[in-house]
């Protein structure tokens, strides 16, 4: 995924504060089922808020980055046990019917 500018990340974090948590990563970590669920949500929403299990800050950041790479998205923020992932919508050709 392309890198987001700091201004765009700041905007997405502010929008994401109001979003509900839509996915919870369990103790098993990032499984195929979790990655598929998050990918399906990103296809409809673009910005998804995820709950990560307790652990050290580095472990939580690692889980968020692993999930971002599994879903071809960008990790916008990891705050406590909450992470936000963003994947822009695919652009459709304008001449498509």
Image (cartoon, rainbow, N blue to C red):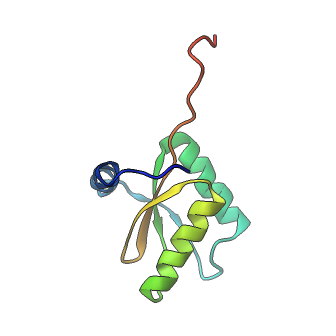
Residue 5 sits above or below residue 97 on the image: below
Residue 83 sits above or below residue 13 on the image: below
Q: Residue at the location (58% across, 43% down)?
A: 43
Q: Residue at the location (57% across, 34% down)?
A: 90
Toward which corner of the image does residue 33 lie, by quadrant?
bottom right
Q: Is residue 97 visible?
A: yes
How many callouts does the rendering have? 0
Point out the image quarter for the C terminus. top right
Toward which corner of the image does residue 82 lie, by quadrant?
bottom left
Q: Position of residue 61 (x, y in %)?
A: 48, 76
The one of 34 and 46 positioned closer to us in this rendering: 46
Q: Position of residue 36 (x, y in %)?
A: 68, 56
Q: Is residue 32 left or right of residue 84?
A: right
Q: Residue at the location (48% across, 79% down)?
A: 60
Q: Position of residue 86 (x, y in %)?
A: 47, 52
Q: Is residue 38 left or right of residue 10?
A: right
Residue 54 sits above or below residue 33 on the image: below
Q: Residue at the location (41% across, 51% down)?
A: 4
Looking at the image, which residue sits at the far bottom?
56
Q: Is residue 53 visible?
A: no
Q: Position of residue 65 (x, y in %)?
A: 54, 69
Looking at the image, which residue sits at the far right?
32
């Amino acid at each position: 995924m392309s890198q987001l500018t700091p201004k765009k990340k700041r905007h997405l974090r502010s929008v994401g504060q109001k979003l509900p948590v839509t996915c919870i990563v369990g103790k098993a970590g990032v499984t195929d089922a979790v990655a598929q669920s998050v990918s399906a949500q990103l296809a409809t929403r673009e910005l998804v808020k995820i709950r990560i299990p307790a652990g050290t800050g580095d472990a939580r950041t690692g889980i968020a980055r692993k999930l971002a790479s599994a879903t071809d998205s960008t990790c916008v923020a990891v705050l406590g046990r909450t992470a936000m992932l963003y994947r822009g919508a695919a652009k459709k050709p304008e001449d498509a019917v």
